[in-house]
């Protein structure tokens, strides 16, 4: 049994400039991702992020992205400098590590054929982001078994990530029916610069798919 249509949560990640941020908001993105891991090709300083955030509507979520096993003290320090709505943490943290944050938490998991979906049920977080270990465009959105994402929905909100682009977003949404999607490289002209047309097409196609969550039958 399926419930009423839900609004899909759309996150545009790898934001490095104000123009991309403003366009994403205008096109209807629900959230923007700012990467604070200094080794990332999408790294943005707290000062730069604040300049961009000043131009973003309050209703759009600002998510701090942290790749790898970042020191949680560093994460907390960024939270003190930047008005973030949530933090997205990818590292190998124990469930008990992710408490005491002044923001919502999205726990990211790198998924391959050996991923044990049962581990996510130990985390009391706001959402789970499932990200393929193979993010190449050749790998595409189905570079990990979509049954994993479907199973993960039993334990909370699932945000699908990795390899998504305008050409595959609709099929991914119809099959998985996730809470949200995260897009980055799939709508880029070059690293750190989004393609306006691809961003517009991606969001339009994503909004074209009805998202209905399964409801328990009484």
Image: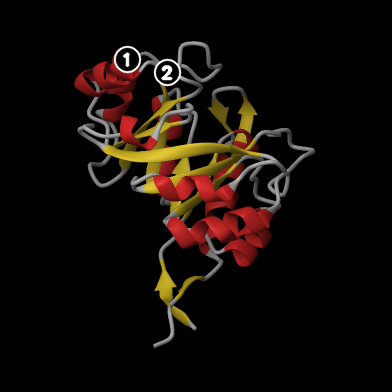
* Residue closest to the far right: 138
Q: Which residue matches tag 2?
A: 70
Badge 2 element: loop
Q: Decide if residue 205 is in sight here.
A: no
* Image-quadrant location for residue 208: bottom right
Query: How far from the left and from the top, in percent, is residue 110?
Result: 59, 35
Q: Are marks 2 and 1 in contact (CB under 8 Å)?
A: yes
Measured along the vertical axis of the image, is residue 71 above or below residue 29?
above
Q: Rounded to the nearest whole Å, what is the CA distance between mark 2 and mark 1?
A: 7 Å
Residue that label 1 marks: 74
* Residue placed most toward the observer, 182 or 28: 182
Q: In the rendering, which numbered label is found on residue 108?
A: none
Residues 16 and 7: in front is 7
Q: Is residue 58 visible?
A: yes
Q: Pointer 1: residues within 10 angstroms few (<14), some, or many (20+)?
A: few
Residue name at image x 48 percent, y 46 percent: 120
Q: Quadrant of residue 183?
A: top right
Q: Is residue 134 left or right of residue 14?
A: right
Give above or below for 191 relative to 181. Answer: above
Q: Position of residue 118 (x, y in %)?
A: 53, 50
Check the image and name the residue furthest to the bottom: 218
Measured from the top left, where is residue 168 in percent x and y? 69, 53
Q: Looking at the picture, tell me which residue is in the foreground, 118 or 212.
A: 118
């Amino acid at each position: 049994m399926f419930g009423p249509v839900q609004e899909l949560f759309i996150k545009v990640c790898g934001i490095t400039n104000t123009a991309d941020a403003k366009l994403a908001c205008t096109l209807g993105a629900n959230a923007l991702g700012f990467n604070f891991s200094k080794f990332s090709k999408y790294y943005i300083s707290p000062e730069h992020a604040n300049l961009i955030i000043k131009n973003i509507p309050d209703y759009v979520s600002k998510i701090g992205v942290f790749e790898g096993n970042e020191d949680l003290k560093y994460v907390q320090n960024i939270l003190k400098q930047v008005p973030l709505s949530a933090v997205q943490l990818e590292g190998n943290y124990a469930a008990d590590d992710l408490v005491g944050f002044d923001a919502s938490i999205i726990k990211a998991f790198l998924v391959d054929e050996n991923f044990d979906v049962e581990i996510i049920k130990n985390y009391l977080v706001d959402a789970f982001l499932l990200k393929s270990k193979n993010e190449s465009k050749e790998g595409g959105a189905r570079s990990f078994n979509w049954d994993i994402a479907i199973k993960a929905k039993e334990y909370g909100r699932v945000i699908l990530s990795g390899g998504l682009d305008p050409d595959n977003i609709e099929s991914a949404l119809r099959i998985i029916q996730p809470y949200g999607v995260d897009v980055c490289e799939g709508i880029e002209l070059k690293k750190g610069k989004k393609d306006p047309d691809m961003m517009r097409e991606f969001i339009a196609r994503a909004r074209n798919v009805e998202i209905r969550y399964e409801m328990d039958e009484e």
